[in-house]
Image (tube, rainbow, N blue to C red):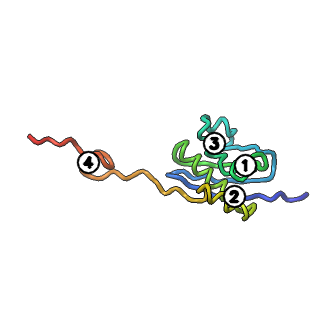
Amino acid sequence: MTQLQEYVATGRRKTSVARVRMVAGSGKIDINGRTFEEYFGTAPLQNTVLQPLQTVKQVNVYDISINATGGGAAGQAGAARLAISRALLQVDGNLRAGLKAEALLRRDPRRKERKKSGQPGARKRFQFSKR
């Protein structure tokens, strides 16, 4: 029995973490035991996850299993996108230029700003009364 080459990578976005296992196959994508279309119901989220594969023109080449935790749908989609990009780099280092040009290898550092004391939110102030 021949051992299939498996590529494992991790991506993060906001408070989400996505762990990806990529194996040569027919293009089937599973996320947390559910199908890709079922888990990410909207087209923009689906496109976010598929973006690295579309960039390197390898959409139906790999079977991908994603384990996503934390955050919401957009954060998990962004984390999965970064993880898939990193896994593709393990497959072929020559893909780096195309992925880098689309900024798919950069981790998005934006997070929710913390609430400050003495005010109701991160930036919002309590109503000011002159009299």
Nearer to us: label 3 or label 4: 3
Q: CA distance from mark 3 to mark 1?
A: 15 Å
Q: Earlier in the sequence, mark 3 or mark 1?
A: 3
Image disc number at residue 26: none
Q: Which residue is mark 4?
A: 119
Label 4 amino acid? Answer: Gln
Image disc number at residue 64: 1
Q: Is residue 60 above or below residue 91?
A: above
Image disc number at residue 87: 2
Marks 3,4: beta carbons within 8 A: no
Where, quadrant-wise, is the N terminus in this rendering?
A: bottom right
Marks 1,2: beta carbons within 8 A: yes
Please, what secondary structure does the residue beneath circle 4 have? Answer: loop
Q: Residue 46, how many percent across, how many down?
A: 63, 41
Q: CA distance from mark 1 to mark 2?
A: 10 Å
Q: Residue 86, how many percent across, how many down?
A: 66, 59
Nearer to us: label 2 or label 4: 2
Q: Badge 2: few (under 14), some or many (20 or more) residues near its Cα, within 10 Å?
A: many
Q: Which residue is mark 3?
A: 47
Please, what secondary structure does the residue beneath circle 1 have? Answer: strand
Nearer to us: label 3 or label 1: 3
Quadrant of residue 6 in the image? bottom right
Q: Badge 1: few (under 14), some or many (20 or more) residues near its Cα, within 10 Å?
A: many
Q: Nearer the viewer, residue 9 or 86?
A: 86
Q: Residue 29, how many percent across, how many down?
A: 72, 44
Marks 2,4: beta carbons within 8 A: no
Q: Earlier in the sequence, mark 1 or mark 2?
A: 1
